[in-house]
Image (cartoon, grey):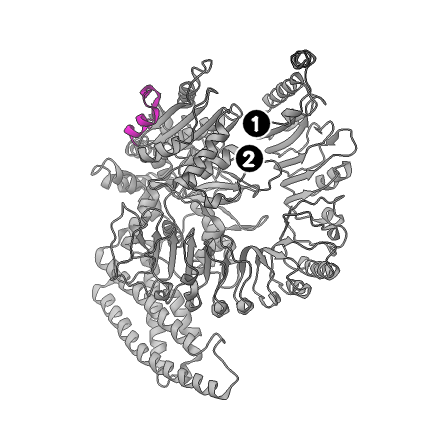
Amino acid sequence: MPALAPLATQQSAATARGVRGRRCREHTGLGPAAARFAGDSSRRRRGVGVVGTEVEDEVLASNFQQMASALSGVMTSVISKLMTLLGEECAKLKGLQREVNFMTDELSSMNALLQRLAEVDNVLDVQTKEWRRQVREMTYDIEDCIDDFMHQIGYNGMAHSAGLVDRVVQHLKELRARHRIANQIQELKAHIEDANKRRMRYKLDERAFEFSNATTIDPRLPSLYTEPDGLVGIDQPNDELLRLLMEGEEESMQQPKVVSIVGPGGLGKTTLANEVYRRLEGQFQCRAFVSLSQQPDVKKILRNILSQVSQQEYANMEIWDEEMFINAIREFLKNKRYFVVVDDIWSTQAWKTIKCAFCVNACGSRILATTRVVSIAKSCCSPHHDHVYEIMPLSTDNSKSLFFKRIFGSKDTCPPQLEEASFNILRRCKGSPLAIITIASLLANKASTKEEWDTVHKSIGSTLDKDPDVEEMRRILSLSYDDLPHHLKTCLLYLSIFPEDYEIERDQVVKRWIAEGFINTDGEQDAEVIGECHFNDLINRSMIQPVKVEYDGRVDSCRVHDMILDLLVSKCIEENFATFLGNKNLKLELQGKIRRLSLNYYCQEDVMVPSTAMISHCRSLSIWGYSEQMPSLSKFRVLRVLDIENGEEMAQNYFEHIRNLLQLKYLRLNVRSIDALPEQLGELQHLQTLDLRGSKITKLPKSIVHLQNLTCLRVKNLELPEEIGNLHSLQEILEIKINRNCSASSLLGLGSLTKLRHLGLRWCIVDTHPDSKAFIDNLLSSLCKLGRINLRSVCIQSYYGYSIDFLLDSWFPTPHLLQKFEMSLNYHFPRIPSWIASLSKLTYLDINVDPVDEETLEVLGNLPLLMFLWVSSNATAPKERLVVTSSMFICLKEFQFTCWSNGAGLMFEAGAMPRLERLRVPFNAGTGLYFGIQHLSSLRSLVIEIICSGATVQEVEALEEAIRSAAGLLPNHPTLELRTWDEEKMAKEEGIAHVEDNTAG
């Protein structure tokens, strides 16, 4: 039975009626590291920044030097600070000009050597690695010293005072600080001299290899994402598993049928389960796909199942326990035919708990489980052990097909001089899809010569014979890691900080990379664009797995494969890059000062930071979960990153020490128990990102307007701060609430934010408000100003039906750079706003219009770059059918139409929406059977909402059959999901009605 490569878990529950969710979909196939690709590779080496902007890797590389890295520490940052910051103080530091110059020169020379060593990290001897470790640790200490000094002398401008006494006190403080730094510089100079002497004594320069040129980009690399027809070896195991699942379909089963897939990690259990999940779409009333981990959060898993099967959110779910989730799931499933995939089960206890949610019914429900452990697989299926499917490695032919497709784009293409090397490499990979894809990714970036491939083969073979299990795979994965540029190594290692199986958001990790100094632009390029390119490159190189993919193809989130995560953790410990507490399978090894600390209380609540641990020099603190043993924030003097998630029981006073984290650049608090921050928050002058969306904070301290480096403010239902116009660096504000507690004048401040690109508002002003005109006028003034400069996206939300009629004709001049407009409120424009037609760069539009008419379709259809469209309406007008012609929507890839009174429905002419891949539309049963769906030649996913009100059973069934027939004519064989609404309002057939009348009589 052929194996399939691991696949990122698909959890694509459709959005429920009337509920607006984020418009991104879960990736149906893993990145190249774990899925089988067959297709063109034109997208492989290209990093995508903001929508519509591409940045070539070559351009980035030519302008790149990291301020911080796993291998060289913060050497570049230290040199920069010595030359710029201390340079301004040297005149006041009597006699130290020479010493500072000496330190700068010596560190620059060491940095050049560190950069050379980073290129050949995998071949360094122990002595060289030890010297590098000592220098790396020294750079951290030097930067901490400089930062502390600059704060003491009030370099950031926050320490000055107008009073005479205060000025004298400040002057005395500065004298003491300068005296202290003078002594520290002498001490640091001695450390640098010692390091340099060791360098000379060990002759490290002679032992380092010459810098090698970066490999060229191979345009033949397979495409980033694959469709099901791009998988290798899928048919036979897929058919066998479908047979196991669906046989006995005619029988009325008294309990759900459970089938297990079992096999070692890396053979493709998740990929196979996902393909079966895709193939069975539409055959069950509800379904769910969830993935566990070695220490699963069972409550989170149950909540995920409930959300997917019900397609809705319940009130107060945050306070539910496991029993409440189980009862809710059982109640929803009791009379439904359901299909649930439970992926990656590690313990029978976890399975037993989750299984409680699956009620016993006679509806022919199915459950598919995957695990690495045979006993667990049997336990899931007990007593039907014949329902265990053992996944096997790829056959020789399928291994070759996967290998050659990945490198050459065709399974039958291999230069004759490489056939022997290919055979030897594949023999070592032993049919493991992950190993094959990993080594193929490595070779795709190298010259197609026998010598180069033989070198790779020998590198694999040096350890493969020692351990046929874990070490074999780790060595292969290490080869791909070693081949990464050192800036990508640092970014990849950083992902190990997140818990196992954690879904890592792209924006979250990119902002953390920036705060840590891993991204440097020299002021010429946008750091987030470069960071996203690094993120995409890690996906392209098969090191991380895409999970959610947005409408424009950008990867919104990722996961790290278990085997890669193990490798990263071991390397982090080896380089003292990060320290991990809470992983039961990991032995704590303290290696001097802790630089980055990850505390996982999800796995182990009673874990404590040892009293011997030196945490005062920690730069990044990530806390997952809650424990009473959490270390106080007062112990972390030099934090750059603070990220706390789901510390639901944290006391308010735990955060009072945030004000002392003066080097903090990134702060994310996903903590529901917190409702306020210290008033001194404004003293965090280095803060760049403030993310409070998971907290209960509704009002920020007034001092926030002093955060001159703040670029990103993400909040939820938080009132618009006064004087927000002072935050001149802001590029992103998400979900600021504008209500009667705000001042109308504060809205004018928005217009002063000339760098603002992304704006999210929650509009809560009623028309009867006495100052409503002032609010509206000031908001329009700010929007017009922002639209002329940098504004890229606008999202307006509200829980109630507040009118935004003022936007119909008043946004002038047109926001010419706008790429995204989204509204999520119980309000409909009476027509399309006049300025929409001029948005030549718009790619994403979510809009409410009532009614929808031909003019609406014409305006929207002529937007030249529109890729995603969601239109919501109460009705269409006129009553006759609306027609989508071949000249409309030439770039549209996803279209969702919500309308519960749409007459005869939409009609798609031949050639309409030529690039459309995903479609969700309603049709009224009984109004016709022909809609032109067969003309949508690029369609891959089709969801039809059938409105049954007033229709007979025969009319509904006829419509379903017509839709299936039309979809069956499409070349891509799209997945089809039929949903029915208002079934209780269906017309009764005469015969049935007559019987009911007699019964009633």
Q: Nearer the viewer, residue 20 or 864?
A: 20
* Label 1: few (<14), some (14–19) or many (≥20) C-alpha neighbours in 10 Å: some
Give residue 65's quadrant in the image.
bottom left
The magenta stretch is 373-394
Give residue 455's quadrant in the image.
top left
Question: Looking at the image, is 90 positioned above or below residue 975?
Answer: below
Q: Nearer the viewer, residue 401 or 183?
A: 183
Question: With 420 as the anchor, is 743 left or right in this view?
Answer: right
Question: Looking at the image, is 846 positioned above or below residue 262?
Answer: below
Q: Would residue 376 be counted in the magenta stretch?
A: yes
Which amino acid type is marked by label 2? Ala
Task: Say which residue label 1 marks.
Answer: 977
Measuring from the top left, give residue 40's x and y in whole percent. 50, 35
Question: With 781 as the anchor, is 732 left or right in this view?
Answer: left
Tell me which residue sits at (67%, 25%) in the image.
985
Between discs 1 and 2, the one toward the N terminus = 2
Q: Tell me if I can see residue 190 in this picture.
A: yes
Q: Nearer the viewer, residue 832 or 47?
A: 832
Question: With 278 as the anchor, is 887 left or right in this view?
Answer: right
- Could you say which disc has been placed on residue 14 in the image? 2
Tell me which residue sits at (42%, 75%) in the image.
150
CB within 8 Å, label 1 to label 2? yes
Q: Secondary structure at mark 2?
A: loop
Q: CA distance from mark 1 to mark 2?
A: 10 Å
Q: Quadrant of the C terminus?
A: top right
Give residue 826's quadrant in the image.
top right
Q: Tell me if I can see residue 5 in this picture.
A: no
Q: Would residue 900 be counted in the magenta stretch?
A: no
Q: Nearer the viewer, residue 796 or 839?
A: 796
* Label 2: few (<14), some (14–19) or many (≥20) C-alpha neighbours in 10 Å: some
